[in-house]
Amino acid sequence: MIAPATVSAQGRVVRSGRLKQSVSRWPYIDIPFPTFCEAVAEMGLPAIDLLEENEWDIAAEYGLICSMGYGGGGTIEDGLNVRANHDEIVTNLQQAMPRAVERKVPNLITFFGNRRGMSDSEAIRNCVDGLRRLAPSAEEHGITICVELLNSKVDHPDYQGDRTPFGAEIIRRVDSPRVKLLNDIYHMQIMEGDVIRTIRDNAESIAHYHTGGVPGRNELDENQELQWPAICRAIVETGFDGYVAHEFKPTRDPLTSLREAVALCDV
């Protein structure tokens, strides 16, 4: 069982720093953004995840970057598996790339989309074609396009990109250093488990990770089933140099829960 890490109420939490940690904004939406930025910076985190473009400059005022930005890359339901969505997704992300470079945003998010009866083979072909249109611009700008893996069992019924092999096959076919997966460990634990082996076997396809306790997407503590220090060590051992962003929903004091998670994953 994972016990909450013992941390002080204030001051820097990151000590080792072998793993670059970040935190998603949305679970802390009730905290004013400047206050949240100040707390994140105080902990020693370099970044905040899943920010809209109008928030990138505010984060920068606190010495932070946006580690995963929104750039109009479709929605969870309407993504790259449908060819009719490609023009809008490609145009939006291409237009966002220069602005992301200016603000040191390394990653932009996009999605596979819902099945709606589509076969995996058709979806793979469609996603590959859409991502191949994005790859040259992403390579030119040095921006990584990350397609998120999500569970279809609990949170996102009918989502097509719900297993690592599906996503990894698309990334393999696109064959670009700037088109990768966002592996949300919470979602993939629900769908397939075997988290550490999956990370090791698919490390080349993954550019970004999200955390979250299973079940419930709550704290990384004794009430959930994953061993986060072991998972984080496995990520480090693959040579990963991207970000692991906390994306759990706190059930206790939110910043205390975040400080504990950061300490736990600072392997």
Image (spheres, grey):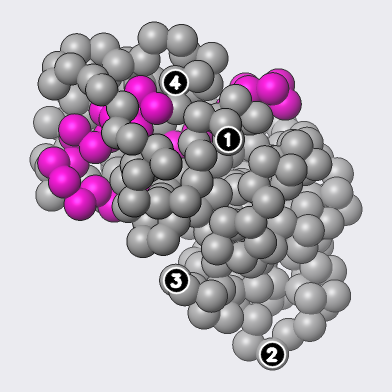
Q: Is residue 251 magenta?
A: yes
Q: CA distance from mark 4 to mark 1?
A: 11 Å
Q: Of circles 2 and 3, which is in front?
A: 3
> Which residue is tagged 4?
266
Q: CA distance from mark 2 to mark 3?
A: 18 Å
Q: Residue furthest top?
A: 15
Residue type at tag 1: Ile
Q: Which mark is residue 9?
A: none
Residue type at tag 4: Asp
> Which residue is tagged 1?
231
Q: CA distance from mark 4 to mark 3?
A: 28 Å
Please report whichever mark, 1 or 3, sits nearer to the chain's N-terminal start.
3
Please report whichever mark, 4 or 2, sits nearer to the chain's N-terminal start.
2
- Regarding mark 1 in the picture, which secondary structure is present there? helix
Few, some or many residues within 10 Å of mark 4 (<14, 14–19, 20+): many
- Regarding mark 3 in the picture, which secondary structure is present there? loop
> Which residue is tagged 2?
117
Tell me which corner region of the image, top left, top right, bottom left or bottom right, holds residue 175. top right
- Regarding mark 4 in the picture, which secondary structure is present there? loop
Please report whichever mark, 4 or 3, sits nearer to the chain's N-terminal start.
3
Q: Can residue 30 be spotted in the picture?
A: yes
Residue at 79 percent across and 82 percent down: it is 119
Q: CA distance from mark 2 to mark 1?
A: 34 Å
Which quadrant is the N terminus positioned in?
top left
- Regarding mark 2 in the picture, which secondary structure is present there? loop
Residue type at tag 2: Gly
